[in-house]
Image: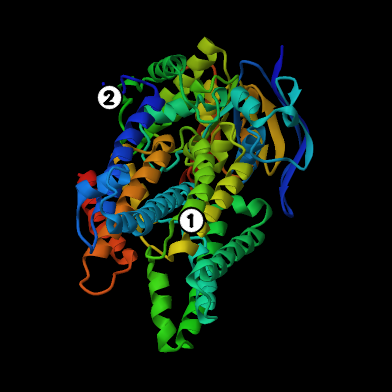
């Protein structure tokens, strides 16, 4: 019998422990490897404060690689979780964290910031955050009252907001001189290179409560998948659950997008990947997306750092290049 | 006897379109109550109002002698369970997972189920004959099996009243009878009040202890099957030719459809 232990709690803990282990290993690899040499042992010593002999390595590990790896893990976790929530809320397997226009809004904000010559942090991050929050407010106003519960209204509003935003983005890009164009394209492709430990710490402190709130509503998401009406008859207050999940997720995604631009694909693929392996119970999927999504992004970022001979590649390129074929392979296998 | 559902002066409209007009009726506890009527007569709307999904503009509803408005969502879920029309699910839950969801109104927010809840789920699956399917996912089941999974989920909710929306609509003949037999068994053994919305007047005649015939949002007829399903009343409501006689199987009416080309034969009878 597969379900000998009925307690879903046990399953959550086993899955979480395994994925946490995976995440820690990938983070360790991420910190150990880089263009200045791959020394796992020395890094381990440095991490646990036993080294002290190699101060340059200490600096690289603590001030460059560690914050970057941590940022990658946080971003991967947030985007995967965001995709999972939106797929459940909209009951649409094609949903992803940017689907309600967060990407478009923050991109406009970021481009305006770059064009105005603001520094990457806090200037551009701030304008990007403002942009995405503005689209969220706009969206909530457009679908105010009852119609927020009609998933197609929300979905179509989001698609329209995104379409409108892309037009503005193209308009702004076509008006831009070459020098700033590179910055804009890098931002649009997603880029984890700008990270210091202070910023990443603040981000982590913002995201953690969001993760907890979403986990608390994970069983409600299971019930929502039965359809709004069925969920209601099983005791779910759908309008409050929908609003809380929508706002929490959008806020969480906005906070990461403003740090690292539009990293595509993670949010679409990771929830599906984990669902194919673990089933549809969101109480298992929420922690799995946080840990698994984090590990995936750390690996993709590592590849993005190591592959190019000159400069760096945006991590968003790697997430899609690996994610799409992997996903198709798993999909074919599960259909057998 | 206690009333499971009591409705007084109920009206409901979508914007300008009035669907239900000043309905009043009650369903005693332990009934097999079947709501029939033509397309667009307001059957499903009425069911959604009783389930607490839609709020009527006018009128009072009492569930087990307590106003519907006083129930919290969870309380209502412990009182009324709804079995939907065949629902397509894009997300493949296993049968056990889905049946266990019925426990959620009795559990905390995260719905962590205890051994007791598993026991209730196993009983519900045994009662509906789906215990062999426990580990399958929903997309591997046939329509009849799916229907029974949703009924098991409703039983798991431990309600007093079960509402079924067109439970036989997409089932073959054998499964139609099986589902209705199952509901009758549940009514007798557990004491549920069963309220069914159906298109099938013959099944309604066979199983209903009382029928409500709706037409354009008003009650055309209410009573025992043999009083509601008269030829005159049905022809007026459905606006087509029919033949109603007593079923050779038992003392309930049998409704026979008459195609246009046989109208003359009907007149000669």
Q: Earlier in the sequence, mark 2 or mark 1?
A: 2
Q: Is B9 left, or right, of A174 in this rendering?
A: right
The numbered dot on residue B12 is none
- Nearest the camera: A319 or B184? A319
* Labels 2, 1: front one: 1
User: What crowding class fits label 1: few (fewer than 14 Cα within 10 Å), some (14-19), or many (20 or more)?
Assistant: few
Helix, strand or loop at mark 2:
loop
Percent position of residue A99, x then y: 47, 60
Percent position of residue B269, x then y: 52, 33
- Above or below, B117 against B59 in this view is above
**Is residue B72 visible in this depiction of the protein?**
yes
Point out the image quarter for the N terminus of chain B: top right
Q: Are marks 2 and 1 in contact (CB under 8 Å)?
A: no
Q: Is B250 left, or right, of B55 in this rendering?
A: left
The numbered dot on residue A2 is 2
Residue to which mark 1 is pinned: A198
- Nearest the camera: B80 or B233? B80
Marks 2/1: CA–CA distance: 46 Å
Percent position of residue B263, x then y: 51, 43
Residue at position x 64%, y 41% in the image: B45
Q: Chain of mark 1?
A: A
**Is residue B225 visible in this depiction of the protein?**
no
Percent position of residue A34, x then y: 24, 60
Q: Chain of mark 2?
A: A
Residue at position x 42%, y 61% in the image: A195
Q: Which quadrant holds residue A11?
A: top left
């Amino acid at each position: 019998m597969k379900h000998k232990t009925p307690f879903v709690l046990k399953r959550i803990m086993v899955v979480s422990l395994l994925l946490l282990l995976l995440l820690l290993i990938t983070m360790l690899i991420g910190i150990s490897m880089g263009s200045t040499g791959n020394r796992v042992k020395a890094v381990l010593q440095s991490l646990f404060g036993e080294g002290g002999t190699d101060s340059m390595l200490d600096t690289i590990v603590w001030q460059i690689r560690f914050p970057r790896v941590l940022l990658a893990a946080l971003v991967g976790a947030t985007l995967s979780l965001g995709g999972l929530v939106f797929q459940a809320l909209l009951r649409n397997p094609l949903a992803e964290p940017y689907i309600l226009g967060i990407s478009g809004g923050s991109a406009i904000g970021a481009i305006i910031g770059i064009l105005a010559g603001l520094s990457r942090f806090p200037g551009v991050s701030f304008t990007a955050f403002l942009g995405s929050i503005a689209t969220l407010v706009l969206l909530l106003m457009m679908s105010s009252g009852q119609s927020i519960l009609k998933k197609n209204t929300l979905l179509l509003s989001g698609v329209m907001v995104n379409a409108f935003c892309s037009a503005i983005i193209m308009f702004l890009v076509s008006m831009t001189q070459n020098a700033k164009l590179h910055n804009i394209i890098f931002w649009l492709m997603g880029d984890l290179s700008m990270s210091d430990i202070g910023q990443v710490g603040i981000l982590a402190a913002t995201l953690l409560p969001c993760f907890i709130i979403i986990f608390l509503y994970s069983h409600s998401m299971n019930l929502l998948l039965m359809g709004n009406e069925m969920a209601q008859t099983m005791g779910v207050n759908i309008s409050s659950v929908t609003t809380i999940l929508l706002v929490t997720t959008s806020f969480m995604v906005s906070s990461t997008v403003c740090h690292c631009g539009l990293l595509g694909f993670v949010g679409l693929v990771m929830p599906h990947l984990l669902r194919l392996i673990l089933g549809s119970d969101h109480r298992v999927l929420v922690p799995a997306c946080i840990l698994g999504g984090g590990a995936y992004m750390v690996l993709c970022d590592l590849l993005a750092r190591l592959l190019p001979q000159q400069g760096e590649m945006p991590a968003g390129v790697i997430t899609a290049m690996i994610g799409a074929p992997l996903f198709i392979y798993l999909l074919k296998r599960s259909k057998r | 006897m206690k009333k499971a559902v009591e409705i007084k002066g109920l009206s409901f409209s979508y914007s300008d379109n009035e669907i239900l007009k000043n309905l009043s009726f009650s369903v005693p506890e332990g009934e097999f109550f079947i709501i029939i009527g033509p397309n667009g007569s307001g059957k499903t709307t009425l069911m959604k109002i009783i389930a607490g999904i839609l709020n009527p503009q006018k009128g009072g509803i009492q569930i087990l002698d307590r106003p519907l408005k006083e129930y919290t969502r969870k309380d209502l879920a412990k009182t009324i369970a709804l079995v939907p029309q065949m629902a397509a699910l894009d997300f493949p839950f296993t049968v056990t997972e889905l049946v266990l969801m019925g426990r959620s109104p009795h559990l905390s927010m995260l719905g962590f189920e205890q051994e007791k809840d598993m026991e209730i789920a196993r009983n519900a699956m045994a009662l509906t004959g789906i215990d062999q399917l426990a580990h399958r996912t929903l997309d591997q089941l046939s329509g009849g099996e799916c229907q029974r999974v949703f009924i098991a989920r409703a039983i798991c909710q431990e309600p007093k009243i079960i509402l079924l929306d067109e439970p036989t609509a997409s089932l073959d003949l054998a499964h139609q009878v099986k589902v209705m037999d199952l509901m009758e068994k549940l009514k007798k053994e557990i004491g549920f009040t069963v309220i069914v919305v159906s298109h099938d007047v013959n099944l309604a005649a066979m199983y209903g202890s009382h029928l409500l015939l709706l037409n354009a949002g008003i009650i055309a007829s209410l009573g025992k099957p043999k009083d509601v399903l008269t030829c005159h009343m049905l022809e007026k409501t459905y606006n087509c030719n029919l033949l109603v006689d007593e079923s050779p199987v038992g003392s309930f009416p049998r409704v026979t459809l008459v195609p246009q080309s046989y109208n003359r034969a009907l007149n000669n009878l």
